[in-house]
Image (spheres, helix red, strand yellow):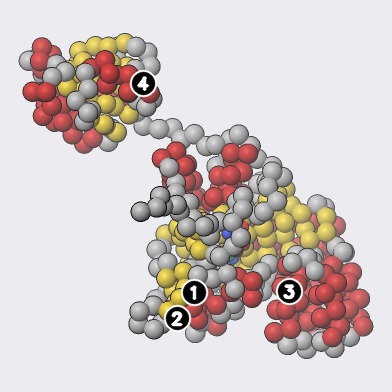
Amino acid sequence: MPLFKTVRGMRDFLPDEAKAMKNLENRARRIAKLYGYDEIITPIVESYELLSAKAGDEVRSRMFFFKDLGGRDVALRYEFTASVARLVATAFRNEPKPLRLFSVGTLYRYDEPQKGRYREFWQSNYELMGSSRPEADAEIIMLTDSLLKSAGLKGHTFKIGHVGVLRSIFHQEKLQEDTQNAIMQLMDKKQCDAALETVKNAGASANAIKTIQKLMKLKSNDAFDVVDKMRSCVENYKEAADEVDNLFKILKLISESRCEIGIHVDASFARGLEYYTGMIFEVNVPELDIALGGGGRYDKLVELFGGEPTPALGVAHGLDRILLALQMQNASPKEQEASAVVVIAVQESLIAEAMKIAQKLRDAEIRVEVDVMGRKVAKALENADRKKIDYAVIVGEKELAENSAVVKDLQRREQKAIKIDEIANLIKSGNLS
Ligand code: HAM
């Protein structure tokens, strides 16, 4: 047999990496709790038709698609949003709104593997269903900022745009939805000239072309200045002007709440997924040229899946990339870990007693390893030091006769015989003396 490797684009998470990922996952879960999002678990395999409905050509071409043994067209999920929208159109159809739903787990895209880009990756995903108001948009951005700050990240900035502005102009110019999607895909790839060419070929008016050309140049860290300029750009387009106003309200809510967020507004910003209808955003750090997260408003998706018309928006955070960014900023989050303990029997006849004590400590929620290598005490202690274990409980005949065992603080190098019933409390208090 050959020595097997992981499949291209797939990774193993060794203990430290797995711990970091699980810590971040739990942090995302805590943020969900703080903002009132309930966790749901959806399947990794979904129908291809559901996933491909509004994916956009780029994502569609990168799906892990296959026929199952029953001949069904299925694919591995490439995002959570489609699954959540499916639920809102079905099981949650009659639930009172708003619904705040959180998911976390692995996603699959046949992307070209490189730093921060994998074929299996993790997202924490938050969807807010049932509100068309700007405070919902502001919440999703503030929640993203809360997660990144709580993970220890610094210097992240939000790039914010609004696809509703451009789409309203296209709509007023009677451009077909397919053409609109093609234009947005080109803009997502920063091919603005080709996008403009497509607008021209679709028969848009000279005024529309001039307006779009001007909009494409509007971007700055001075958010309200860009919004002012966008407003004067779209004077002749009533619906587009309303969308600019919507963007203004979202930005105003963010700036008036006390949360300090670095914002760059870009009127030409588009995202690959086709379902977006309003505000869109991505979050970046200077250390990486790929986004740590992204999201936006998609008011038509639930309806497309057969549900009630439901305004909606959400965000997904790339957990692998957040960990990478933290590493690059030398800011790997250190969770306050509970103390770890090793229980060592001095002689073979005491192993059952050692296991009994270990079980008692675990019942008190203490992490315990039992030496299962038959090591002598000195060797077992050496191994505990190597593994940075905090305490050793050494089970010897003499102490056992008095219902006690020796507890050794491996950092302070102090030790003391302690009644077995009191060991858990002492270890939890962190103080042997
Ligand atoms: P997305 O921008 O496609 O949005 O993905 C969100 C995040 O997932 C990206 O910003 C990135 O951090 C991470 N990500 C994407 N592809 C990869 C990859 N190949 N390797 C590592 N990380 C990756 C969505 O998925 C939308 N569903 C977000 C959303 C939720 N919109 C509304 N609700």
Which quarter shows the C terminus? top left
Q: Nearer the viewer, mark 4 or mark 1?
A: 1
Marks 3 and 4 in Cβ contact (< 8 Å): no
Which of pointers 4 and 1 lies earlier in the amino acid sequence?
1
x 88%, y 75%: residue: 211
Which residue lies under the disc numbered 4?
385
Residue 58 falls in image quadrant:
bottom right
Query: Marks 3/4: CA distance?
Result: 57 Å
Q: Tag 3's secondary structure?
A: helix
Q: CA distance from mark 1 to mark 3?
A: 24 Å
Q: Position of residue 271 (x, y in %)?
A: 68, 67
Q: Residue under circle 3?
A: 184
Task: Kindly check if marks 2 and 1 are in contact, taking CB atoms under 8 A apart as contact.
Answer: yes
Pointer 2 residue: 73
Quarter of the image where ligand 1 sits: bottom right
For the question of whether residue 36 can be seen, the reply is no
Residue 41 placed where, x, y %? Answer: 39, 63
Q: Tell me the kind of residue under disc 1.
A: Phe
Q: Secondary structure at mark 1?
A: strand
User: Does residue 322 appear to the left or right of 420 in the view shown?
Assistant: right
In front of the other: label 3 or label 4?
4
Gap between marks 4 and 1 measured at Cα: 48 Å
Q: Are marks 2 and 3 in contact (CB under 8 Å)?
A: no
Q: Between disc 3 and disc 4, whose residue precedes?
A: 3
Q: Is residue 213 above or below residue 335?
A: below
Type of amino acid at the residue the image marks with label 2: Asp
- Mark in front: 2 vs 3: 2
Mark 1, residue position: 65
